[in-house]
Image (cartoon, helix red, strand yellow):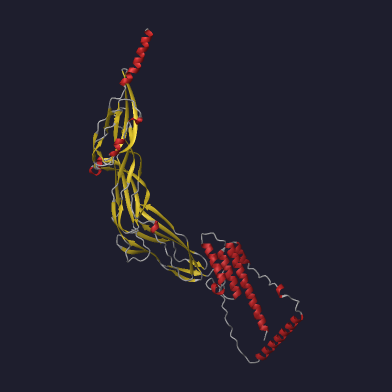
């Protein structure tokens, strides 16, 4: 009997406290009131029982608030065999509008919390020293031209520790937006309060005239704030934050009608090159010009190609321009580098015309020019090219008229010899077959072969000119080559283009084509000489 009573007592001691643990109270509180618009606050709901995480329905908050992250914690306290349990929900809320916003009563298992009247004020009405985070945006000019670069700077001020965050670029219509350089991290004191400042710079280039509206950038992230719990073990917790920059309107002007040339607007434009005066060059030797165009407060995509004019007797082989944009002393500088190879085709003194690049100065509202002065150069004949041969006719003095009888006798003998040779050919018609006659191979120029084997285009052209000068008995240069042999001149131009081009070209095929054309010229030259000799035998 005693055992039965003891068992009933223990069961009562175990099950009776369960009734005391039933939910009896639900409390709701906020970490601050009033609160600024677009700022999150923490709503804490406490139940005096251990409950499931989904026991609290927060759908009633969606009407006037943006509901953010929700965290749940539970605790149990035992004091003098008195057990007390709690369930805490912490909900991050952001009011949707200004004025008085009510946090509605929340219900769990029939127990309701008290509603809270929340005062939401305009963020702009609060002094900056009362804000933990805000944005400032500035633009370099409120009036600009199409194609002019605007410098747009954004500063994020933080009085709390930043855990993570994303800063969006400014939003514009009809303009190009690019970030310039890296973010800068510094600190400033604003109205006696120290802020961490993160600065970012953007370049904005408008494509069309009119009003350009630059919507302010937005920042969203998480910062560390003190936990609203008042226990001695409270720590910092993560809190989402948002900020919006002010919008800016810029008036964009069109290109002036008086402007001549490729459109370029910048604060300053400079044109330079590496050049040494009093230089002398040889025919066929390339003259390399490295020209650099710099423009302050401009983008590299707006820089025009540099046009290099040339005098007659020269050919140019420009490379693809190299462009880049860089930051120097807080300024954006665009750079274009143009490399041009110039090949003179004949000797003489030349003047390379000046190089000009037009640009528009927005501060003076007028057109200006960046120039390179004219260059004077001297081109000498190639070192391996033979000097031109000038045939000077020798004066002939007639002593008497007795030469004509001798001349007539010589022509008569030649006529008789021609008749004899013709008669012998008629006697042996099948002795020789003209189709079996093969011309003797032309003697190759070892210098030309060596130059082709070495893949030296300069030596190949020099050896070719010597060969042609020897065949034609007069000086042959690159300038008059087209008159003597047009097809050969075209092959020479292709060899020059392949030499100065960056693209891979089959020069071996070009050299083979050059040798074939040269052999053809030699054969045609020999045939003309044989025909002339036979005609001289016929009276």
Tell me which residue sits at (67%, 91%) in the image. 405
Picture quarter containing residue 145? bottom left
Farthest residue, direction bottom: 401
Q: Position of residue 444 (x, y in %)?
A: 64, 68
Picture quarter containing residue 519? bottom right
> Where does the C terminus fall, quadrant-wise?
bottom right
Left or right of 485, for residue 12: left
Q: Position of residue 136 (x, y in %)?
A: 29, 47
Residue 259 versus residue 357: which sits nearer the camera? Answer: 259
Residue 403 versus residue 369: which sits nearer the camera? Answer: 369
Could you tell me if residue 94 is visible in this image?
no
> Where does the N terminus fall, quadrant-wise?
top left
Q: Is 454 rendered above or below residue 466?
A: above
Q: Position of residue 90 (x, y in %)?
A: 31, 32
Could you tell me if residue 360 is visible in this image?
yes
Q: Is 58 rendered above or below residue 274?
A: above
Q: Position of residue 181 (x, y in %)?
A: 38, 49
Q: Is 398 rendered above or below residue 371?
A: below
Residue 219 versus residue 316: which sits nearer the camera? Answer: 219
Left or right of 223, for residue 441: right
Residue 186 versus residue 521: which sits nearer the camera? Answer: 521
Tell me which residue sits at (34%, 36%) in the image. 69
């Amino acid at each position: 009997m005693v055992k039965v009573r003891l068992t009933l007592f223990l069961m009562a001691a175990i099950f009776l406290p369960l009734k005391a643990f039933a939910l009896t109270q639900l409390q709701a509180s906020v970490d601050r009131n009033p609160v600024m618009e677009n700022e999150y606050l923490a709503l804490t709901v406490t139940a005096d029982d251990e409950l499931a995480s989904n026991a609290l329905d927060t759908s009633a908050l969606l009407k006037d608030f943006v509901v953010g992250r929700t965290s749940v914690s539970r605790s149990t306290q035992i004091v003098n065999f008195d057990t007390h349990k709690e369930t805490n929900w912490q909900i991050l809320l952001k009011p949707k509008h200004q004025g008085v916003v009510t946090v509605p009563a929340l219900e769990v298992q029939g127990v309701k919390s008290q509603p809270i009247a929340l005062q939401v004020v305009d963020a702009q009405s609060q002094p900056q020293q009362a804000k933990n985070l805000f944005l400032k945006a500035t633009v370099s000019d409120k009036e600009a031209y199409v194609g002019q670069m605007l410098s747009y700077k954004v500063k994020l001020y933080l009085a709390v520790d930043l855990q993570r965050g994303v800063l969006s670029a400014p939003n514009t219509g009809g303009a190009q937006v690019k970030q310039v350089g890296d973010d800068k991290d510094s600190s400033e004191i604003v109205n006696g309060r120290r802020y961490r400042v993160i600065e970012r710079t953007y370049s904005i280039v408008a494509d069309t005239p009119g009003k350009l509206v630059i919507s302010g950038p937005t920042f969203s992230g998480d910062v560390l704030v003190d936990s609203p719990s008042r226990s001695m073990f409270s720590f910092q917790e993560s809190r989402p934050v948002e900020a919006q920059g002010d919008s800016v309107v810029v008036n964009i002007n069109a290109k002036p009608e008086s402007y001549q040339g490729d459109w370029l607007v910048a604060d300053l434009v400079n044109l330079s090159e590496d050049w040494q005066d009093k230089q002398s060059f040889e025919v066929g030797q390339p003259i390399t010009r490295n020209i650099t165009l710099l423009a302050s407060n401009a983008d590299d995509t707006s820089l025009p190609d540099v046009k290099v004019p040339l005098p007659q007797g020269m050919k140019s082989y420009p490379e693809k321009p190299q462009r880049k944009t860089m930051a120097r002393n807080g300024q954006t500088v665009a750079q274009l580098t143009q490399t041009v190879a110039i090949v003179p085709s004949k000797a003489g003194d030349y003047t390379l015309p000046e190089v000009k690049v037009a640009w528009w100065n927005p501060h003076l509202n007028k057109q200006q020019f960046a120039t390179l002065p004219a260059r004077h150069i001297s081109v000498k004949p190639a070192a391996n090219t033979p000097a031109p041969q000038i045939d000077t006719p020798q004066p002939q003095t007639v002593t008497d008229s007795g030469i004509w009888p001798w001349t007539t006798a010589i022509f008569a003998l030649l006529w008789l010899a021609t008749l004899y040779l013709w008669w012998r050919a008629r006697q042996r018609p099948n002795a020789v077959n003209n189709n079996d006659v093969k011309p003797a191979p032309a003697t190759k120029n070892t210098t030309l072969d060596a130059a082709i084997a070495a893949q030296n285009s300069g030596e190949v052209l020099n050896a070719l000119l010597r060969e042609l000068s020897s065949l034609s008995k007069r000086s042959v240069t690159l300038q008059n080559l087209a008159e003597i042999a047009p097809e050969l001149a075209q092959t020479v131009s292709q060899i020059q283009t392949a030499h100065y081009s960056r693209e891979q070209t089959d020069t071996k095929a070009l050299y083979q084509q050059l040798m074939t054309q040269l052999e053809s010229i030699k054969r045609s030259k020999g045939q003309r000489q044989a025909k002339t000799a036979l005609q001289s035998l016929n009276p």
